[in-house]
Image (cartoon, rainbow, N blue to C red):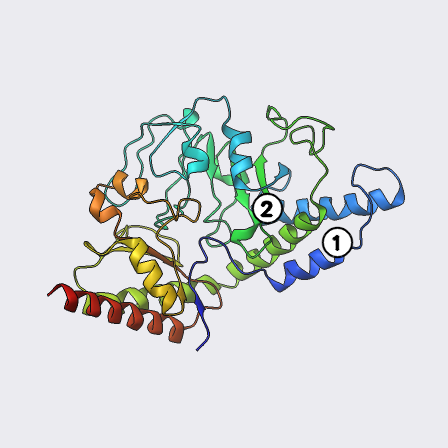
Amino acid sequence: MSRVYLDHAATTPLRAEARAAMISAMDAVGNPSSVHSEGRAAKSIVERARALVAEAVGAVGADVVFTSGSTEAAALALGGRGLVGADIEHDAVWSWIDPVLAVDDQGQVTVTDPVRSTLQWANSETGVVQTLPEGLAVSDITQGFGKRPFAFNWAGVGMVFISAHKIGGPKGVGALVFPQGTDVAAQIKGGGQEMGRRSGTENVIGIAGFGAAAAAAQADLDAGRWDAVAKLRNILEEAIEAEAPETIFVGNRGPRLPNVTTFVTPGWKGETQVMAMDLAGFAVSAGSACSSGKVKSSRVLRAMGFDAEAAASAIRVSLGLDTTEDQVLRFAQAWLNKRKTLRSRVA
């Protein structure tokens, strides 16, 4: 039986639209900074993708600066600003902030001073979604982008950043979005590309794929395709809860992304669960892909009030647009079978 990929929050399969755009861009031999015909052709690919990304994120008229991903975009947005945030932030943000904001047991953050704060829109480990306060300085919208409606020009947030590989685009390309005229100091200096905010020859192929993926992701969102995914997520949770009532579904009493469920099974380490499910043919994770493999309990879950043992006993299952009900039920049954075997050994 073929393997089932249920780790879409870590990265998504490359969309056909992105693949086609990237293959086409490979024929553009020019440097986007060159003024000759070949250079202008490459530049037009970059600018077309910039327009597509801006439209998808609701930021027409704003500046979109392409980066190597959300981590670099976070550094560009946060470096030297001294903002505060919460312990639920991704490491790419957490490393730059003073994590003093309070988090409740459903993963909701209390922001007391938006103009001095950063707040992740949707959490990468739990899928918990925040309401972004007016005047917020910066938001990491990487996980929510393409899965829930968002319009930068209406959100009242100073800056947001996104990554292509979370929406079916290529790995290694992202973007920082902010109003025109905003003072953003370059951290990578050189030739002055990307409006002087990020030097270095543009990744034309990756950017082309990003633009195509952004347009396709917006079309899927408009078509309501994620509503069906949310139903599958609920089917999965109901199947597990029916036979394993001790399972704790993180943040399920508040708003979550439609495709993410993180659940805690006290006494069964997350890493052990991930390995067991991998052997059974299912790809899941024990948290953010950037922190998986590190033997430690989740900082995000600890911030939500879980003790160290419980925080280390969580796995994240994240579905995609092509995930089927059969795959979800097969996973639930395989997980329950592994749980039953473990319990029989302990008894």
In-image side of 218 versus 266 (left or right): right
Q: Residue furthest right?
A: 36
Q: Quadrant of residue 301?
A: top left
Q: Counting other residues with Cα less than 10 Å from the Cα at mark 2, is it few (<14), some (14-19), or many (20 or more)?
A: some
- Classify mark 1: residues with Cα within 10 Å, few (<14), some (14-19) or many (20+): many
Q: Residue 51: image x %, image y %?
A: 67, 46
Q: Position of residue 174 (x, y in %)?
A: 58, 43
Can residue 202 be seen here? The reply is yes
The quadrant the C terminus occupies is bottom left
Q: Which mark is residue 172?
A: 2
**What is the three-letter code of the residue carrying label 2?**
Gly
Q: Is residue 48 left or right of 27 when viewed as pictured?
A: left
Of the 4 image quadrants, the one containing the N terminus is: bottom left
Marks 1 and 2, how far apart in space? 16 Å
Which comes before the other along the chain, label 1 or label 2? 1
Secondary structure beneath dot 2 equals loop
**Residue 45 shown left or right of residue 123 in the figure:** right
- Please state which of residues 217 and 82 is positioned toward the viewer in this rendering: 82
The image shows a total of numbered marks equal to 2
Q: Nearer the viewer, residue 9 or 287?
A: 287
In the image, which disc is placed on residue 136?
none
* Amino acid type at image mark 1: Ala
**Residue at image mark 1:** 25
Q: Residue at x 45, y 49 (%)?
A: 144
Residue 247, image x, y percentages: 21, 59
Of badges 1 and 2, nearer the viewer stands 2
